[in-house]
Image (spheres, helix red, strand yellow):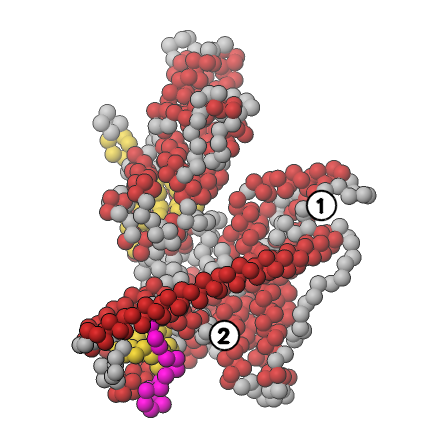
Amino acid sequence: MSDLDNPFSPLAVARAVSFDEVSIETDAIREAYAAVRGYLETRTPSPEGLPVRSGNVLAVCGDYGTGKTHLAGWLMRHVRDATEGAVDPLYLDPASDSFLDLYRAFVTKLGLSAIQSRVNELYADIVADSMQGKGMTSDVVQWLKDGEIEPRLVVERLGLTESMLLKAVAGMLGSLTGDNDLAQALTLLLRPGFETAVWEWLMGSPPEPVLTDREITKVVGTERAALDMLGSLTLLMGGQQRHFVVVVDEFHELFLGHGRTDTEVLDGFQKLLEVFSAANAFLVLAGVPEALTVLPAGVRQRIGRVVMMSGLSVDTVCEFITLAQHRQFGVARLSPFSRDTVAYLVSLSGGRARTVIRLCHELYRIAVTGRQPVSEEMITQVVRDQLGTSSTQDVPADVRRVLDGKGLSYLRDHVLGGPESRADFWLPLGDDTGCAILVTRSLLEPDDVDRVNRRKIAIQVCRPQATVVIVVNGVVSDRVNQLVRESFDLYPLIYRPGQFIEDLNAVIDTVTTRLRRLHDENPFNAMQERIDQLNRQQTTVMSALEQVVVQSENSQAAVNRSFALLQRDIADLTAAAYGVVTSAPERGQPLPADVDRLFTEPISLLDRLIEFNGVFDGAFPQPGWDPDQAADVRDELQNLLRSRALIEANGAAAALRQAVLAFRRVVAEWYHSEEVRMSSERLTDDAEDRLDTLCRAYGSIVEFVPIDRLEPLIRRGRQPDFIARVSQSLRRADLDAALDVLHVRVRRALLKSVFVKGQ
């Protein structure tokens, strides 16, 4: 079965821009919809008795994969539909934790033409007002107010005093935005020849002499300045009862990764939220709940409403499956699922939207290919394959990183008594006690819980006062959640890259403090243990510093090697673009045709997307080449390098390509290893485990590559310019089909190939 015939997305990564996905009405959607509808429709009286639209700030909070971006995309589509396209919400996805970068993205998305159009509207109103009572026809005045005639044309033909009118525009802009420098710069947009200077200044460059001559001296070069300017532009675009909607996705990136304590920036963010209400604009902040906890109380009070994402219910998932198949095939049906299997699926996945959709994709493929209904056994196996995404080496490595950082002594794979008393990590904290860390796979069924519980009991039989910390590399299903709480003193830690180290640090601090307080009766023993711990911490720090020195000494050689490979790749691609025959690139060790095809398809598609390949060399005239063609290439390059979105898209495509190539290389090494070559009928457990580790590693890496940011390249590939002809066009569906769950398909194809080889 082709992935194109599968009604469920294998990646389940929502795209807020160009949103076109199946949506089910949930409590979160209903609550968010009410907030947006209130903004679009509700009027409140102003002090003068006039109807005034009320601005708002809405926060959409939920864990990763719960549907925040999907909801943001749904809201944006609703705003466009409700206003018949008159309002096109601005979507921002922070590329870093810098408000300065967020501001530049805001200005880029807004665009010079939209800013000019807004300033022109204000100019038209002022020209129209100046004509009132001067015998001018009401038609001309109305045409100006409706934007049907250019105010500059009216001023020229009627001989109006332009300088006085522009001064009035600057005054209005100053009152509206609260920024005199911005007001003067925007007024210059009404005169020819100033667009480039004003645009570069808005993007954060120091003002050119043509601007400083007009007393425009401000520079948007700090985060606070960026927040203030973002607020001023919001007042411009949302003032005078205009709709203006901005969506900031993953807004937690601006706070959690930075650990912000700078009062000036936090005050600036609080002021920005106040501006959105004052400007009668609407701001949507989508992110994880932890982001709200780090915000000062004053900032949280400026958020009008918080919508919390929750897990999908059984009824909701059944409705989603039915609608997805109706959209794909024109038939609304639940089969090959049943309500019982959907309930089991929800219990294992916790109703997390992204997880549910990914599992539905794989379950549907297996069911249709095997011509059988989805069963609980099938769901259990797919959950184990897909949700234990982290490498079996990643979890212990992060545990060691925490313990080494704290200077704690520990034993790896330590057996305290019988065979079931093995602790993945044992931290001795006295003569007869300590802390055991057990690492386990997903807890889906009662048998999984019993297996871990037997290990916990065996350890505590040997060390009655020991504390057991359980780390789950996967998920804890809803159906065993209560059993887990009853069986274990501490609820298991779920391994999530980027968050696990912080969680484990907190648990270890709590456990070690409690155990030492209970068992370190002799103060001299406690002091000696603390001294030993500090010595171990110092050793860890010194080892880390030595490693940094070694890495820095080797970095130049590594860079040189990488640059040489990059030069070779660019040369080959450039030669191919101009019809020059070169030697074929090294493909590495061969793989079976069915497996190799899984790699060549995404690599080929990504090669067609990456716009830098072969373009720079084409910008320099060569003997026998058309000089006009080189000039065209240079023009295209200049446009490309000005676009942050295209730069990011090229980077994402290059990262994906490198990930696929690296995955192919390690898989080929596995396939040609002696252990696999000597396999007859089936692989050894160790060989299969090693393959699973490689596949999970690839899946965990690619999950964090911003695939959605390839969209600017896909759209650009449809344009008739030189670079587009080099990269060629392709459909988003082709790329999704080639990249979706690649590691799962590669694993399946490899196991099948090894089995066939052994016959």
Q: In which quarter of the image is the C terminus?
A: bottom right
Question: Horizontal and vertical percent for residue 496?
Answer: 39, 66
Indicate whether 153 appears above or below 723: above
- The part of the image, by quadrant, that contains residue 473 is bottom left
Q: In this view, does 376 lie to the left or right of 38?
A: right
Q: Residue at x 26, y 73 (%)?
A: 528
**Residue 219 visible in the snapshot:** yes
Residue density around tag 2, few if under 14, some if 14–19, many if 20 or more, within 10 Å: some
Q: Which residue is drawn at 30% across and 34% down?
A: 278
Question: Horizontal and vertical percent for residue 289?
Answer: 31, 56
Amino acid, disc 2: Thr
Residue bearing mark 2: 693
Residue 417 sits inside the magenta stretch: yes
Q: What element carries label 2?
A: helix
Q: Quadrant of the N terminus?
A: bottom right
Amino acid, disc 1: Gly
Instruction: Give me the disc on residue 618.
Output: 1
> How far apart are the two marked residues, 2 and 1, measured between alpha carbons?
42 Å
The magenta-colored residue range is: 407-422
Q: Say if mark 2 contacts mark 1, CB within 8 Å.
A: no
**Residue 5 visible in the snapshot:** no
